[in-house]
Image (cartoon, rainbow, N blue to C red):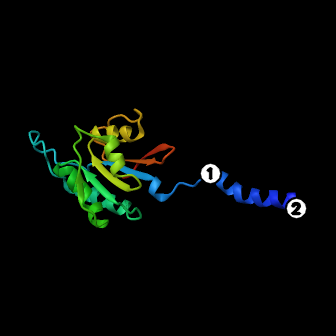
Amino acid sequence: MKNFILLALISLLLLPSCAPKAEKKEDVSTYYLIRHAEKDRSDKTNRNPHLTEDGLKRAENWAKHFKNVKFDMVYSTDYNRTKETAMPAAKANNVELNFYNPSDMKIEEFMLKTKGKTVLIVGHSNTTPKFTNGLLGEEKYQDIADDNNSNLYIVTVTKNSKSSKLSVVD
């Protein structure tokens, strides 16, 4: 009987250490990636246009869409259209706008810097899918059609997994 009680006590002490550990919040990184809103196309020579009225409305709608998401950081390329798309969400979360260079994306460095954070990333029709693929470590998404400003990519990265979801938000 003494041996049984001793064995039961040892089992109770050892079993919890064998259970799988739940991911801690600081081990989960969540990335929301969107393309900039509708840009002014009236001057074909302008490489850095601002948003149109519809684009400004969409930028505000993105901020409303994300009202229940607490962003720790907001990133944008350094173009008028991406900054104007990102600013309403940055202001709503009381965070500064950070910039990334789409020609020199250092994904591993970026992921290390944003580990355990919830991050919004605003880019372009080609850089947003490329950034998403880089976070995932696989070529999953293609460039966005030039008239599509409504894709939302959500990438979740934990110590043991990476997953993504694509949805359309109008």
Taking the image as shown, residue 47 lies to the left or right of residue 165, namely left
In this rendered view, identify the residue nearer to me: 11 or 63. Answer: 11
Q: Position of residue 170 (x, y in %)?
A: 36, 52
Residue type, label 2:
Lys
Q: Which residue is mark 2?
A: 2
Q: CA distance from mark 2 to mark 1?
A: 30 Å
User: What kind of element bears circle 2?
Assistant: helix
The N terminus sits in image quarter: bottom right
Label 1 belongs to which residue? 20
Near-viewer residue (94 or 3): 3
Q: Position of residue 99 (x, y in %)?
A: 22, 51
**Circle nearer the viewer, 2 or 1:** 2
Circle 1 Cα neighbour tier, 10 Å, few/some/many (<14 / 14–19 / ≥20): few
Q: At 42% from the left edge and 52% from the top edge, which residue is drawn?
A: 29
Q: Residue furthest top?
A: 139
Circle 1 sits in a helix, a strand or a loop, which is it? Answer: loop
- Is residue 150 visible to us here? no
Give the amino acid type for the residue marked by disc 1 in the picture: Pro
* Rendered view: 94 above or below 97: below
Mark identifier at residue 111: none
* Spot occupied by residue 133 in the image (x, y as percentages of width and height): 38, 37
**Place of residue 84 in the rendered image (x, y in percent of width and height, measured from the top left):** 21, 56
Residue 97 drawn above or below residue 41: below
Decide if residue 51 is in sight here: yes
Image position of 27 with respect to 128: above or below: below
- Quadrant in the rendering for residue 62: bottom left
- Whether pointer 2 and pointer 1 mark residues with C-beta atoms closer than 8 Å, the reply is no
The answer to which of 160 and 142 lies nearer the viewer is 160
Mark 2 surroundings within 10 Å by alpha-carbon count, few (fewer than 14), some (14 through 19), many (20 or more) = few
